[in-house]
Image: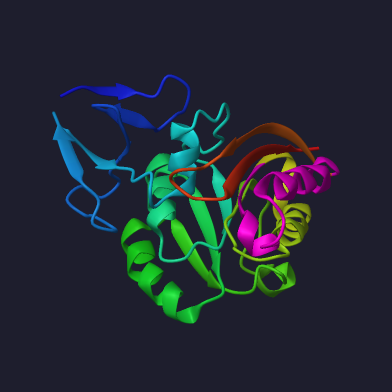
Amino acid sequence: MKVKKHEKFEGVFLINGKLATLNLLPGETVYGEELVKFGEKEYRIWDLWRSKPAAAIKKGIKEFPIKKGIKILYLGIASGTTASHFSDIVEKEGIIYGVEFSERVLRELIPIAEKRGNIIPILGDARKPEEYRNIVIEKVDVVYCDVASPDEIELFIRNSLEFLKPKGYGMIAIKSRSIDVLKKPEEIYKEARKKLENFFEILDFVRLDPYDKDHGFFVLKFK
């Protein structure tokens, strides 16, 4: 078995060609993922089919701004599959503010957040950042958005204007069918790029097929 650091991205590892992160809580799984012990360390295999950032890395994204010690605002955190890997990477020094609209889904995240200590679950509507301004009391290094909604780009921009540091990074996973079921995905991504370019420098874009059909993934830098 071979474990090696990803050549470009901090906190990301390759184990026999599979993506992995160093487990913040050895012995604990979050979503039934495979655990791999190597020496004194334990790694969690990062499932490409269940996590869009993992799929983006596999598809060759050139920038991935998640690093040790940073602060992240995660819009659409759901039950914490992807967030748990971000949690591994940012370690105890980092923090993830996770906004989720569904109370039922957020309930699944709470025990994970309590154990990990670096995830703050927020029940809220990402369209209304003023609702959680009193919880996210600092500017963040990264805003990540995975909200399947026709107004996803607008709410992502709104939250970035509210919470993202100058020259901070954005990542957004766009489900083209949620924005317009009649248009081709290519058209949706082109329109998204135009809107995003008003506020961000586009660092990279990849399509996530076959891992997530009709999804695109942008990595951005706040102007």
* Quadrant of the drawing holding the N terminus: top left
Residue in the picture at 43% in, 80% down:
104
Q: Quadrant of residue 117?
A: bottom left
Q: Quadrant of residue 81?
A: bottom left
Is 128 left, or right, of 18 in this rendering? right
Vertical arrangement, residue 177 with respect to residue 5, above or below: below
* Quadrant of the drawing holding the C terminus: top right
Residue in the picture at 46% in, 37% down:
68
Location of residue 195 in the rendering, given as x and y in whole percent from the top left corner: 82, 48
| Residue 183 belongs to magenta span | yes
Location of residue 116 in the rendering, given as x and y in whole percent from the top left corner: 34, 57
| Extreme-bottom residue of the structure | 104
Q: Quadrant of residue 39?
A: top left
Vertical arrangement, residue 4 with respect to residue 35, above or below: above
Depth check: give the residue in front, 39 or 219: 219
Give the extent of the magenta segment: 170-198
Depth check: give the residue in front, 179 or 78: 179
Location of residue 100 in the rendering, given as x and y in whole percent from the top left corner: 54, 70
Residue in the picture at 39% in, 24% down:
6
